[in-house]
Image (cartoon, grey):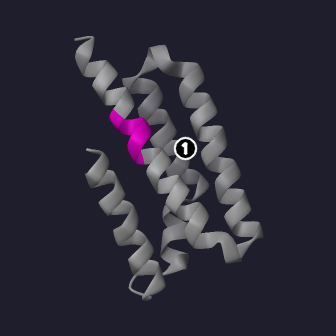
Amino acid sequence: MADEIAQRHHDIEDGIEYNLISKDILMRELSERRINQLEKAYYERFPKFHKSIEYFFKDIRNSILTVRKKGFLFKKIYGKIIVNILTTDLILNIIYNLEK
C-alpha cells in the first residue's frame, strides 16, 4: 500500500511539473466545500476517531491556506496533502476493518 501511495504522489507531482494537471483544478478540488464533504464522510464512517479526524482536517486546511498564500510551495505542500489524505484513509480503514 505504501508503494501505491507513493506512486499516486509522484503521478500528481509529475502532472503538475509537466502541466498535465492544472494548479487551478487541483485547488478547486481542495475547496472548502469538498474538504467539508470529505470530513463529514470521515465522521460518519469513523465516529470513534472524532478527535483524530478533527486534527487531521485542521492540518489539511492549514496546508491549503499555506498553498494559497505562498504559491511557490504549491507542489511540495500539495504532495503533503495528498500523502496525508491517502495514509490517513488507509490507517482508518485498516482499524475499521480489524474491529469488524
Q: Is residue 54 above or below residue 2?
A: above
- Residue stretch rendered in magenta on the structure: 86-90
Residue 46 in percent (x, y) is at 41, 22
- For label 1, the SS is helix
Answer left or right for 80 relative to 3: right
Tell me residue 94's x, y (percent).
29, 26
Residue appearing at x 49%, y 19% in the figure? 49
Q: Nearer the viewer, residue 18 or 29?
A: 18
Instruction: Report which quarter residue 80 is drawn in.
Output: bottom right
Q: Give the quarter of the figure containing the N terminus.
A: top left
Residue in the picture at 67% in, 71% down: 73
Extreme residue in the bottom direction: 18
- Three-letter code for the amino acid on which mark 1 is drawn: Asn
Answer above or below: position of 29 versus 44: below
Q: Majority secondary structure of the magenta segment? A: helix
Q: Residue at position x 45%, y 46% from top? A: 85
Query: Within 10 Å of the Cα at label 1, are there few (<14), some (14-19), or many (20+) other Cα atoms?
Result: few
Residue at 65% across, 58% down: 64
Residue on which the image places disc 1: 36
35 left or right of 71 in image: left
* Residue 79 is inside the magenta segment: no
Residue 78 pos. (x, y %): 55, 63
